[in-house]
Image: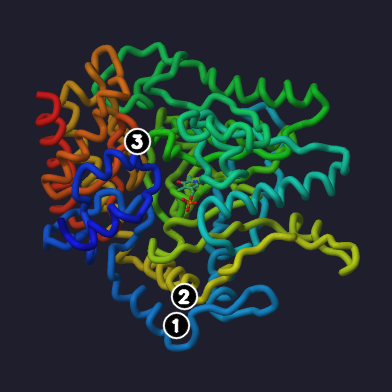
C-alpha cells in the first residue's frame, strides 16, 4: 500500500464514513487536480463529478484564483477581524452585497392570499465565518436575538425548517436539520425546531401520477397539498401565541436530503406564507449559491413560465423572486478553494444590535479566521470569473449538455427519477421504475454504483440510493458525456 494511504489508515478519521469499511481497502489518495480532472498518487486519472463534495466551481488550479491567492500571500495570509479591517474582506463584502440584491421581477403575493408585495429586504451587511454550518449558526443566533429584541424578551423564538433539511453539523445547524440518520443520535444535545413537509414529488403521498420516464415534477398530479400543510403549520403556531421567528430552507433543491428539487413556484408560495405570518426568511444557499442552479428551470405549466422568467442571478432564491432576510453562503464562495462562509442580512437586523458599549448589545460571536484574507481574495477572483461572459456561456452550455445526456438514463429499469436543477443532478436508483420500489439500505446500491464509477475513472459520492452529478463549471462537453456514460455503464454493471 502507498505510504500516504498507510498513514491515513493509521491516523485519519474520515467524515460521514464507516471506518471499518474504509480500512478494508486502499483509499484513493488525491495528489493533484486541474480543471475537472483529479489525479491520485499512482497517476490514475479521474473526473471530479461532484466538484469535491459540491465546493468547486471553476475547476482545480484555476489560473485566476491561483494568481489571486498567490498575490495575497505575498502581502499577508491572515490578520484578525477582531479589532482590524482588511482589504480583501471589505472588497468582498461590497461585491457580495452587489450580487445578492438583483432587481427581482416583481411578483405579487396575492396567490397565497396575503396582501401586497412589500419592499424586498435589502441585504447590505456581511458577517464572515468559516463554513456552511457556521454561516447557519450566525443566521440562527441573529434571528433569535433580533426576534427577542423586537417582539419581547419573554418570547422563546421558534424556527421552522423542512423535512429532510440539512444545514450543517454543528449543534445549532443540526437542530435545524431533519435527517434522522444524521441527527437523531444527538437529540439530547439539540434545541427543538419544527419541520414541515417539503415537496418530494417522486415519492409524494399526494402525487397521484403513475411513474413515467420523466422528472416527477413534470407529470405530478396534486393540489399543492404540501403548500397547504405549510400554511397550516404557520397558522397553528400562530394560534399558540408564538408565531415562528424564522423559516429556514434550501431554495430550489434540498441537497443532503437526496437532491430533492422543488416544483416551480413552490418556494414563492411558501415564503409568501411565511412572510405573511411575520417569519424571517433564512435561505441556506451553501450548496445552491454562485450559479449552481443555473438559469433555466423546469416550468411545471405555462402559467409558471410566465410567472417566473429566467433570472440571471447567482442565487437560487432569486430564481423564484424570493429575497430572504438572511442569505447563507459557503462551499462555492471561494470557488471551492478555502474554507470561508458569509451570512448576509439587512440594515434592520444590524440596527437591533446597536447600542452603548455598556449595554452589551453587540453580537457576541466570532471565529479566529473570520474575514480571512486568502479566502476573501479567492472569493473575489471567483466572483469575477462568475460574472464573465465566458463563464455564463460555459455554464449554460454545460447545463444543456447535462440535460441531453441525462435523458439516456431513462432506458435503465433501475433508474426511477432523474432530476436536474441547473448544474446539479440527482439520479434515484430503484428496484423497478414501474413501482418506485426502493432498494434497502443494506443493498448499498448507491455505494456500489459509485464504486463501479470510480473504477471507470469518475468520482462522486451517493446519498443513499441517489447518485449525484455536480460537475465543475469548466467541465467540457466530452467530460460531461463521459460522466453520464460511466454512470450508465456502472448501473448496468451493478444490477445486471
Ligand atoms: C454542505 C452544506 C452545509 C454545511 O456546510 P459545511 O461547510 O459542511 O459546514 C449547510 N447547508 C447546506 C445546504 C449544505 O449543502
The image position of residue 317, as x and y in percent, is: 52, 45
Residue drawn 27% across and 26% down?
214
Residue placed under numbered mark 3 in the picture: 463
* Pointer 2 or 1: first along the chain: 1
Q: Nearer the viewer, residue 374 or 317?
A: 374
Badge number at residue 406: none
- Is there CB contact under 8 Å for labels 2 and 3? no
Residue placed under numbered mark 1 in the picture: 72
**Structural distance between the alpha carbons of marks 2 and 3:** 32 Å
- Say left or right for 248 vs 461: right
Crowding at mark 3 (Cα within 10 Å: few <14, some 14-19, many 20+): some
Q: Quadrant of residue 218?
A: top left
* Pointer 2 or 3: first along the chain: 2
Q: Quadrant of residue 72?
A: bottom left
Residue placed under numbered mark 2 in the picture: 374
Queried on whether the Cβ of the residue with tag 2 lies below 8 angstroms from ligand 1, the answer reads: no
- Is there CB contact under 8 Å for labels 2 and 1? yes
- Say left or right for 94 vs 339: right
Amino acid at each position: 500500500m502507498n505510504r500516504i494511504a498507510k498513514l491515513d489508515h493509521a491516523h485519519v478519521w474520515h467524515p460521514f464514513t464507516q471506518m471499518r469499511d474504509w480500512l478494508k481497502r486502499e483509499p484513493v489518495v488525491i495528489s493533484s487536480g486541474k480543471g475537472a480532472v483529479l489525479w491520485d498518487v499512482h497517476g490514475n486519472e479521474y473526473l471530479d463529478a461532484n466538484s469535491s463534495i459540491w465546493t468547486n466551481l471553476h475547476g482545480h488550479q484555476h489560473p485566476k484564483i491561483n494568481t489571486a491567492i498567490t498575490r495575497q500571500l505575498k502581502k499577508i495570509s491572515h490578520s484578525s477581524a477582531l479589532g482590524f479591517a482588511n482589504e480583501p474582506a471589505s472588497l468582498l463584502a461590497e461585491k457580495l452585497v452587489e450580487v445578492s440584491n438583483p432587481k427581482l421581477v416583481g411578483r405579487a403575493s396575492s396567490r397565497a392570499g396575503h396582501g401586497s408585495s412589500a419592499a424586498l429586504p435589502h441585504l447590505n451587511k456581511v458577517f464572515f465565518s468559516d463554513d456552511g454550518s457556521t454561516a447557519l449558526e450566525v443566521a440562527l443566533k441573529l434571528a433569535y436575538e433580533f426576534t427577542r429584541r423586537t417582539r419581547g424578551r419573554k418570547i422563546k423564538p421558534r424556527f421552522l425548517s423542512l423535512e429532510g433539511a440539512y444545514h450543517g453539523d454543528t449543534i445549532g445547524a443540526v437542530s435545524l436539520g431533519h435527517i434522522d440518520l444524521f441527527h437523531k443520535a444527538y437529540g439530547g444535545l439539540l434545541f427543538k425546531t419544527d419541520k414541515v413537509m417539503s415537496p418530494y414529488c417522486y415519492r409524494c403521498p399526494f402525487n397521484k401520477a403513475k411513474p413515467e420516464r420523466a422528472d416527477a415534477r413534470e407529470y405530478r398530479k396534486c393540489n399543492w397539498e404540501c403548500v397547504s400543510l405549510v400554511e397550516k403549520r404557520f397558522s397553528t403556531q400562530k394560534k399558540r401565541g408564538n408565531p415562528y421567528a424564522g423559516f429556514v430552507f434550501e431554495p430550489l433543491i434540498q441537497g443532503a436530503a437526496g437532491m430533492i428539487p422543488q416544483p416551480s413556484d413552490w418556494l414563492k408560495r411558501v415564503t409568501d406564507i411565511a412572510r405573511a405570518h411575520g417569519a424571517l426568511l433564512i435561505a441556506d444557499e451553501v450548496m445552491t449559491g454562485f450559479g449552481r442552479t443555473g438559469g433555466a428551470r423546469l416550468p411545471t405549466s405555462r402559467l409558471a413560465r410566465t410567472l417566473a422568467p429566467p433570472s440571471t442571478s447567482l442565487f437560487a432564491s432569486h430564481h423564484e423572486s424570493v429575497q430572504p432576510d438572511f442569505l447563507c453562503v459557503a462551499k462555492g464562495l471561494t470557488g471551492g478553494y478555502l474554507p470561508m462562509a458569509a451570512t448576509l442580512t439587512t440594515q434592520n437586523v444590524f440596527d437591533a444590535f446597536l447600542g452603548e458599549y455598556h449595554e452589551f448589545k453587540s453580537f457576541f460571536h466570532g471565529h479566529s479566521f473570520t474575514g480571512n484574507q486568502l479566502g476573501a481574495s479567492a472569493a473575489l477572483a471567483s466572483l469575477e470569473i462568475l460574472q464573465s461572459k465566458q463563464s455564463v456561456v460555459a455554464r449554460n452550455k454545460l447545463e444543456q449538455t447535462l440535460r441531453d445526456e441525462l435523458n439516456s438514463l431513462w432506458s435503465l429499469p433501475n433508474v426511477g427519477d432523474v432530476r436536474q436543477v441547473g448544474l446539479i443532478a440527482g439520479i434515484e436508483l430503484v428496484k423497478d421504475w414501474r413501482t418506485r420500489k426502493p432498494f434497502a439500505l443494506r443493498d448499498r446500491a448507491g455505494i456500489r454504483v459509485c464504486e463501479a464509477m470510480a473504477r471507470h475513472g469518475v468520482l462522486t459520492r451517493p446519498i443513499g440510493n441517489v447518485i449525484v452529478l455536480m460537475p465543475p463549471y469548466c467541465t467540457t462537453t466530452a467530460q460531461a458525456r463521459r460522466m453520464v456514460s460511466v454512470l450508465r455503464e456502472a448501473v448496468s454493471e451493478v444490477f445486471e
